[in-house]
Amino acid sequence: MTFRPASEVGFSTRTTRFVAPGSVTNGEFGLFEWRMDARQPGARPHFHKTFSESFYVLEGEITLFDGDEWIKGGEGDFLYVPPNRPHAFRNDSDAPVRMLILFSPGIARENFFLEVGKAKGLSPEELEAFYARHDQYNLPG
């Protein structure tokens, strides 16, 4: 099966491109390309109950919280986060980062990225329901 990746979805300091979303892999995996500008926060501490999240760094250096400590991942590094494991990531470097993010199994994670911008005006209860619907449980910090 051949799939042409979708156009990029832009955020203020980062973009993502759905290389092979779960909706086209029959839920087996989801693969996204993620780009971040220099010195930018990424995802705050959170975990997922039903899928793992892995990061393969193509360019630059990412800083990943693995539930215990912040670790660095550079070009060619693969960082794996199993389900139920708290994690976060950011770009602490002076250069942009480009990486692949692999979700397995491939739930329709693209819907989270397409809808998250609209979630900013939600009440705290609605926001919690939004994140739970997308299997993202945010933690303090």
Image (cartoon, helix red, strand yellow):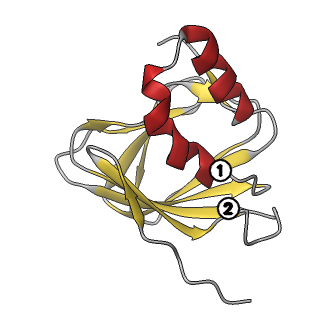
Q: Which mark is residue 30?
A: 2
Q: How packed is label 1: few (under 14 Cα within 10 Å), some, or many (20 or more)?
A: some
Distance of mark 2 from mark 1, alpha carbons?
7 Å
Residue 92 on image: x %, y %: 27, 38
In the image: residue 52, left or right of residue 13:
right
Q: Residue furthest left?
A: 94
Residue 62 on image: x %, y %: 38, 47
In the image: residue 53, left or right of residue 78:
right
**What residue lies at 77% left-to-right and 44% top-to-bottom?**
51
In the image: residue 64, left or right of residue 68:
left
Q: In this rendered view, identify the residue nearer to me: 33 or 131.
A: 131
**What residue lies at 74% left-to-right and 41% top-to-bottom?**
82
Determine the secondary structure under disc 1: loop
Q: How packed is label 2: few (under 14 Cα within 10 Å), some, or many (20 or more)?
A: many
Q: Mark 2 belongs to which amino acid?
A: Gly
Are circles 2 and 1 on residues that touch, CB within 8 Å?
yes
* One can see residue 92 in this view: yes
Mark 1 = which residue? 109
**What residue lies at 51% left-to-right and 19% top-to-bottom?**
122
Q: Mark 1 belongs to which amino acid?
A: Arg
Q: In this rendered view, identify the residue nearer to me: 27 or 114.
A: 114
Q: Which of pointers 2 and 1 indicates the residue nearer the eye? A: 1
Determine the secondary structure under disc 2: strand
Q: In this rendered view, identify the residue nearer to me: 71 or 105.
A: 105
Q: From the viewer's perspective, is residue 106 above or below residue 91?
A: below
* One can see residue 86 in this view: no
